[in-house]
Image (cartoon, rainbow, N blue to C red):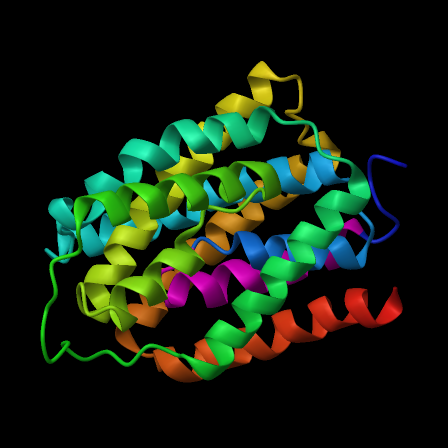
Amino acid sequence: MIDIPPHPWLIAGLAFCVAFLYSSVGFGGASGYLAVMSLFNITARVASTTALVLNVCVAGVAFANYYRHGYLRWRLLWPFLITSIPAAFVGGALPVKQLTYQMLLNGILLFAGLRLLLLAQPQVEPEVEVRPPLWLMLFIGLVLGLISGIVGIGGGIFLSPLIVLARWGNAKQAAACAAGFIVLNSVSGLVGRASGGMLDLGSLGVILIPIGFIGGLLGSYLGAHYLGGRGVQRLLGIILLIVALRFWLGR
């Protein structure tokens, strides 16, 4: 497969939109970048590596903003990280066949699309805040970390709704935890890929990273001041469902 696809700037434009939209609601956007690259049949190595690097950049901006405004609760984040970081390293080092990767990816896109479309998070405080048991947080971190490393996502799109729906924190606290979770697991996944000889940005990744970073800066700023979070999340859900259904219906 060629290193640069026939329409690299079209992919870059779509990646910019993904970074802008996802950062506006506190996510890194890996599932969106992977959805875009899957439309152009980018190899698993390049797609997953590029998505993880973009995740670090975009989610890093979101994490800094939420941390600066006092929404981060370390006791809600660190138990997930204890198991997720080493699991992401292991997942990133595992060689995965292209078909297996595509099936995992599009299964996650289907879940993420339904989650964003049907369970858009309201920006309200939970009625009752529940303290999650430590063993459950460790187990969740292990599972999400492994998935993160294998597919090339940060896992925040799973963690954030879980925190809100389980009433472990409100939407902004969940976004802060998810952003930190995304950054650290993405870094761990990249290190795992490097150790396993799976790290491959290619020329496409070099193009997408600065464009995605700019989109993340703009989206996180405008999202905090002007955009309605629930409407944007539902729009993202529709997009991801279209991409996922394109794969499953075409098989």
Question: Per the image, is 14 magenta?
Answer: yes
For the point 65% across and 60% down, the residue is: 107
Residue 125 appears at what percent x and percent y? 14, 77
Viewer-proximal residue, 16 or 99? 99
Q: Is residue 216 above or below residue 226?
A: above
Please tell me how many numbered marks the rendered image carries: 0
Asked if residue 176 is positioned above or below residue 147 in the image, the reply reads below
Q: Which residue is painted at 39% across and 45% down in the image?
A: 182
- The location of residue 45, given as percent across then percent down, is 71, 34
Please provide percent x and percent y for residue 242.
70, 75
Decide whether the magenta segment is chiefly helix, strand or loop. Answer: helix
Q: Where is the N terminus found, in terms of image quarters?
A: top right
**In the rendered image, which quarter is residue 229 located in?**
bottom left
Place of residue 121 in the rendered image (x, y in percent of width and height, measured from the top left):
33, 77
Residue at 53 percent of width and 40 percent of height: 52
Residue 21 appears in the rendering:
yes
Q: Image quarter for residue 106?
A: bottom right
Residue found 41% across the figure and 37% down from its top: 185
User: Which image quarter holds the C terminus?
Assistant: bottom right
Does 60 sit left or right of 117 as displayed?
left
Is residue 248 placed above or below 51 in the rendered structure? below
78 drawn magenta: no
What residue span does the magenta drawing correspond to?
8-27
Q: Is 87 left or right of 223, judged from the image as shown? A: right
The reply to whether residue 227 is visible in this rendering is no
